[in-house]
């Protein structure tokens, strides 16, 4: 039945993956920034406490990333993905009833763990279902689910907060995760061989993983630090930009949410665009361009008080345009450096760096803002770090392309 479909079944894996990322990252992580102003007012949370709750999410994510490779080997990607999504659903329901800082920290930490358990096997499936020539495009389409989630969250969450309260917003987000779990259970297959297919894309003669074997762990460490900077910086903006617009620039919660929804609109295309571009110009050049745009976004956010609302709009556009480009390229890149057999463990190792950055970023920015009274210095530090990522990427050497197209 699957073999008689008018398209390669890999694209069904992409659809399910996009919905998974819609739930486990787009909603579970990025909607949190939209809930913070209402939670801040009702529960009396300080900026440092808000940052601590966000840090709990990333600690949970870090733990799940470390555990995911062994779980994926034992239970296979579909089971781990479904389990992660169900975990998110349960914890969001409990978050809707939480009042104390410790409970919020613990439960949102478990949401982060569920996000890692859902995200890791989903991204690993890209390497199994798609050959190198289509891998960036496929990863980009999957990650577009994040952008769609940000658009809908920016439009709907403030409305639900106003009409029904932030607690019901958590319930709504939990239902989304439940729906994504059911779709993954129905659609996902762990490997093309399970359904008598070959991976989608042009067959190539290069030996993926060759560069890793010849260069040792040095390249893995380079990639890890580049990914760490992404984790460190992007969630400072993602966690606190709505709060910055409300507290520093006088936006209403609804107006800030509408502006934030534009991040999601542009983010829908970020992974697809830069995944496809990196298929053509190379992963290294793609990462350089992406970090250049990130640097501009953070500079404009830091200077928005001087440059005006136009700078804030341009910052949002820049940030959204590249938001999911780095994970897209990294998901495509990891098998090219390590080979398919080590793709899961390699992506896990890189994601540990990414998760470590996420832990440090929001907590540090919240602590700094609590003492200075503004997030502006945090955005400027982020700009400096992404500029450093460009320098590190310039030192990377990548595999050369060579190649029958399948699908």
Image (tube, rainbow, N blue to C red):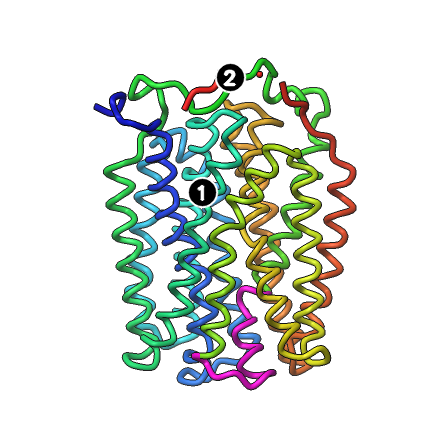
* Residue 164 versus residue 234 in the image, above or below: below
Describe the element under mark 1 as helix, strand or loop.
Answer: helix
Which segment did they paint magenta? 237-254
Q: Residue at x 50, y 50 (%)?
A: 269
Q: Residue at x 47, y 59 (%)?
A: 265
Badge 2, how many Cα within 10 Å: few under 14, some, many 20+?
Answer: some
Would residue 248 be counted in the magenta stretch? yes
Q: Give the percent coordinates (x, y) of residue 176.
A: 29, 57
Q: Return the mark for residue 373.
A: none
Q: CA distance from mark 1 to mark 2?
A: 21 Å
Q: Return the mark for residue 141.
A: 1
Question: For the C terminus, which image quadrant?
Answer: top left
Decide which of 24, 141 is in the foreground and name it: 141
Q: Label 2 near label 1: C-beta < 8 Å?
A: no
Decide which of 112, 30 is in the foreground and name it: 30
Q: Give the percent coordinates (x, y) of residue 272.
A: 51, 44
Q: Residue at x 63, y 46 (%)?
A: 227
* Residue 388 versus residue 138 in the image, above or below: below
> Residue 130 occupies which quadrant of the picture?
top left
Numbered label tally? 2
> Residue 307 occupies which quadrant of the picture?
bottom right
Would residue 194 be counted in the magenta stretch? no
Q: Return the mark for residue 203.
A: 2
* Magenta span: chief secondary structure: helix
- In this orientation, does residue 112 appear? no
Decide which of 126, 404 is in the foreground and name it: 404
Question: For the N terminus, which image quadrant?
Answer: top left
């Amino acid at each position: 039945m699957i073999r008689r479909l008018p398209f390669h079944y890999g694209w069904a894996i992409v659809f399910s993956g996009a919905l998974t990322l819609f739930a486990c990252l787009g909603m579970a992580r990025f909607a949190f920034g939209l809930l913070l102003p209402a939670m801040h007012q009702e529960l009396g949370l300080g900026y440092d406490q808000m940052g601590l709750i966000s840090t709990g999410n990333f600690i949970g994510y870090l733990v799940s990333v470390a555990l995911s490779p062994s779980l994926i080997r034992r239970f296979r990607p579909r089971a781990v993905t479904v389990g992660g999504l169900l975990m998110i659903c349960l914890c969001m329901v409990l978050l809707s009833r939480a009042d104390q800082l410790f409970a919020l920290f613990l439960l949102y930490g478990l949401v982060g763990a569920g996000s890692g358990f859902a995200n890791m096997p989903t991204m690993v499936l890209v390497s199994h279902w798609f050959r190198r020539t289509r891998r960036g495009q496929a990863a980009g389409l999957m990650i577009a689910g994040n952008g769609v989630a940000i658009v809908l969250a920016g439009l709907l969450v403030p409305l639900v907060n106003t009409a029904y309260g932030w607690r019901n917003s958590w319930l709504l987000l939990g239902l989304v995760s439940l729906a994504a779990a059911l779709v993954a259970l129905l659609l996902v297959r762990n490997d093309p061989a399970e359904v008598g297919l070959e991976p989608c894309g042009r067959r190539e003669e290069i030996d993926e993983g060759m560069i890793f074997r010849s260069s040792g762990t040095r390249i893995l460490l380079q990639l890890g630090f580049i990914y760490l900077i992404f984790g460190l910086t992007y969630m400072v903006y993602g966690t606190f930009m709505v709060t910055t617009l409300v507290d520093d620039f006088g936006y209403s919660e609804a107006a800030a949410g509408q502006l934030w929804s534009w991040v999601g609109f542009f983010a829908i295309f970020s992974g697809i665009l830069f995944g496809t571009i990196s298929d053509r110009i190379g992963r290294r050049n793609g990462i350089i361009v992406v970090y250049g745009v990130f640097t501009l976004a953070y500079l404009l956010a830091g200077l928005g008080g001087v440059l005006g609302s136009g700078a804030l709009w341009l910052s949002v556009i820049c940030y959204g345009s590249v938001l999911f480009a780095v994970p897209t390229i990294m998901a495509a890149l990891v098998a090219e450096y390590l080979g398919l057999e080590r793709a899961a463990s390699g992506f896990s190792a890189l994601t540990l760096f990414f998760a470590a950055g996420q832990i440090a970023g929001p907590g540090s920015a919240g602590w700094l803002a609590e003492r200075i009274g503004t997030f502006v210095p945090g955005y400027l530090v982020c700009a400096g770090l992404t500029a450093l990522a460009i320098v590190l990427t310039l030192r990377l050497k990548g595999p050369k392309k060579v190649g029958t197209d399948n699908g």
